[in-house]
Amino acid sequence: MSIEKTDYTDEAQGRLLSTLQGATSLEALVASYTERCQELEAAAYDLYEQRSIDNAVGDRLDMIGWLFNVPRAGRLDDPYRLRLRAEIAILNSDGTALALMGVLQILFALPDLDIEYSEGQPKTAILRPRNYATLLSDWDLDSILDLVRRAAPAGTDVELVASYNKTSDADIFHFSDTADTTESLATYGTENGSVCQNAK
């Protein structure tokens, strides 16, 4: 991210020879040139800001999408901006766990890196985002998985563990841990607990 330079005149006057500093007419002459440079800097920086991925809207955002070969496909500006950021993260990915989680963080719009990462065999990365509020369909999850796979190293499979329409872990199936539904004695599948014997 570039930073706007706002001290052209002060810098130019500070670079004068020490014997010439303080000469008001010479400093005024220098300022007459540098103030024009300052105006050009302000105009150019404003143009730069309007075309940055953070501030671009409408057709300017479409132009960024064209550069990355990511069509808008009916998205509004904010979802489209997230998709473009994800594409940039994919292109910059070095295939590490942190890179894969970073792509997933963008796609799920997570405020922080709340993603569980584990590895399986053979060469499988398993990602599980937690506490995301985005409502997703199966199609959305398939699209997200395809994008994360593009960020993974060659030959690495990626598995995404996420509920398609849920907002928290409380909505995801899990075994009950409450006392009234927990078996106190193993019965091995028989009503009275006896081991079934072969008939003679």
Image: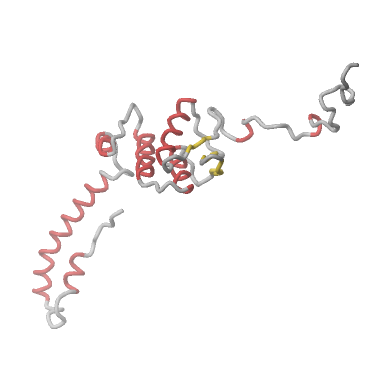
Tell me where residue 13 appears, x and y as whole percent: 17, 72
Foreground residue among 15 and 181: 181
Task: Locate the C terminus by quadrant.
Answer: top right
Foreground residue among 127 and 34: 127
Res 56 quadrant in image: top left
Residue lying at 88% horizontally and 22% vertically, measured from the top left? 197
Foreground residue among 94 and 174: 94
Tell me where residue 28 appears, x and y as whole percent: 11, 70
Q: Is 156 on the left-hand or right-hand side of 161?
A: left
Residue lying at 24% horizontally and 60% vertically, measured from the top left? 5
Residue lying at 71% horizontally and 32% vertically, measured from the top left? 175
Q: Residue furthest bottom?
A: 19
Please give the count of numbered marks on the rendered protein. 0
Q: How is the image coloured?
A: secondary structure
Tell me where residue 107 appears, x and y as whole percent: 44, 38
Q: Is 165 on the left-hand or right-hand side of 84?
A: right
